[in-house]
Image (cartoon, rainbow, N blue to C red):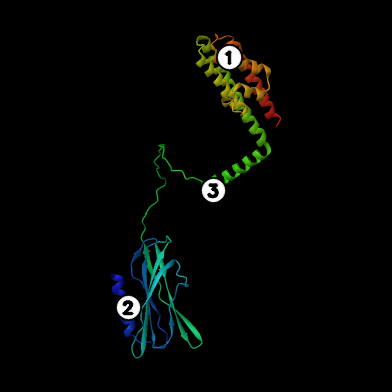
């Protein structure tokens, strides 16, 4: 408030005064007594000159050190018959830590082909110190408590990883794909054989206690089902005669005919244990044949 009253008084004297032989200095002063770091502070600059003589005020290219220009406001020229008054307000900020900071701004007066640089009197402003005294040491609170932090998914690395993995898989399949396919197929066939033999032994053992024609037919159907999966031939839909034509095995023909006789003949069941043991051994022989074909493919 004191600065504003003083500024008004100076400006009034400035307006009613007259210029003698030398040029008047511009009037520049802060409109606040103190400022904090980074806070906007207005600075008033005005100049009285003979009417119609060009006067240039500082713009954003001017060095306002130790202050930085935030924005500026220019006011319309006020003139009478003899003189003109130009004025502007600059909004400045400081980031220096000096207790007292000063500023003087010029106006540029054009005289013919030359220019005259006229500076205002230096005006100072006091910096408000938020932290008045720095402690010798700072006590920090220590905590070992776990603080959960959300993780961000790294999509670029994930995409790059997938591309590299795809390339590796493609190379592996091109170079070793056939061998890998063979090993997988042989592994599955071996698992099927072991499961068949285990279950078939149980079926034969149960057959000793139940020699009904329905049970005999069920055990035979179980064997045909395994052979169908092993050799990809529809055993379950073929008759004994058709199976013999495919396999061309005399021993197999005799065994299947013996089993058919026990199923369809009214004569008492005989030699079932040996017949089905032969079928189990025959299945293993066919398994060995199929695996050899796969290995040599």
Asked if the residue at tag 3 contacts the one at tag 2, i.e. Cβ–Cβ closer than 8 Å, the answer is no
Residue denoted by label 2:
10
Q: Which quadrant would residue 243 be assigned to in this image? A: top right
Q: Which quadrant would residue 242 be assigned to in this image? A: top right
Choose the circle earlier in sequence order: 3 or 1. 3
Checking the image for residue 261, the label placed there is: 1
Q: Please give the name of the residue rendered at 64% of the width and 15% of the height, measured from the top-left corner.
A: 254
Measure how far apart labels 3 and 1 are at the Cα level.
72 Å
Measure how far apart labels 2 and 3 are at the Cα level.
67 Å
Q: Secondary structure at mark 3?
A: helix
Q: Is residue 200 left or right of residue 85?
A: right
Residue 297 coordinates in the image, percent (x, y): 70, 32
User: Would you call the spot at circle 2 few (<14 residues within 10 Å), some (14-19), or many (20 or more)?
Assistant: few
Residue 30 coordinates in the image, percent (x, y): 36, 70
Q: Secondary structure at mark 2?
A: helix
Q: Nearer the viewer, residue 200 or 191?
A: 200
Q: Nearer the viewer, residue 279 or 264?
A: 264
**Which of label 3 and label 1 is nearer to you?**
1
Residue denoted by label 3:
156
Q: Secondary structure at mark 1?
A: helix
């Amino acid at each position: 408030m004191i600065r504003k009253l003083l500024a008004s008084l100076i400006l009034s004297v400035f307006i009613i005064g007259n210029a003698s032989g030398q040029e008047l200095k511009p009037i520049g002063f802060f409109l606040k007594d103190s400022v904090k770091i980074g806070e906007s502070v207005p600075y008033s600059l005005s100049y009285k000159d003979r009417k119609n003589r060009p006067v240039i005020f500082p713009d954003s290219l001017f060095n306002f050190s130790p202050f930085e220009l935030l924005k500026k406001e220019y006011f319309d020229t006020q003139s009478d018959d003899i003189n003109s008054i130009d004025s502007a307000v600059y909004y400045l900020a400081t980031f220096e830590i000096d207790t007292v900071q000063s500023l003087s701004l010029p106006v540029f007066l054009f005289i013919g082909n030359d220019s005259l640089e006229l500076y205002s009197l230096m005006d100072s402003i006091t910096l408000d110190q938020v932290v008045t005294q720095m402690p010798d040491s700072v006590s920090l609170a220590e905590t070992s408590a776990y603080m959960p932090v959300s993780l961000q998914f790294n999509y670029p690395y994930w995409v790059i990883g997938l591309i590299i993995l795809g390339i590796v898989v493609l190379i592996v399949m091109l170079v070793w794909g056939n061998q890998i396919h063979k090993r997988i197929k042989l592994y599955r066939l071996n698992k099927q054989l072991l499961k068949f033999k285990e279950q078939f032994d149980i079926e034969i053992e149960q057959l000793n206690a139940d020699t009904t024609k329905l049970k005999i037919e069920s055990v035979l159907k179980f064997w045909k089902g395994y052979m169908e999966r092993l050799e990809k031939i529809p055993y379950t839909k073929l008759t004994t005669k058709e199976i013999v034509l495919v396999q061309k095995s005399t021993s197999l023909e005799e065994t299947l005919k013996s089993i058919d006789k026990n199923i369809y003949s009214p004569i008492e069941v005989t030699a079932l244990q040996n017949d089905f043991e032969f079928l189990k051994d025959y299945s293993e022989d066919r398994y060995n044949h199929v695996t050899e074909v796969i290995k040599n493919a």
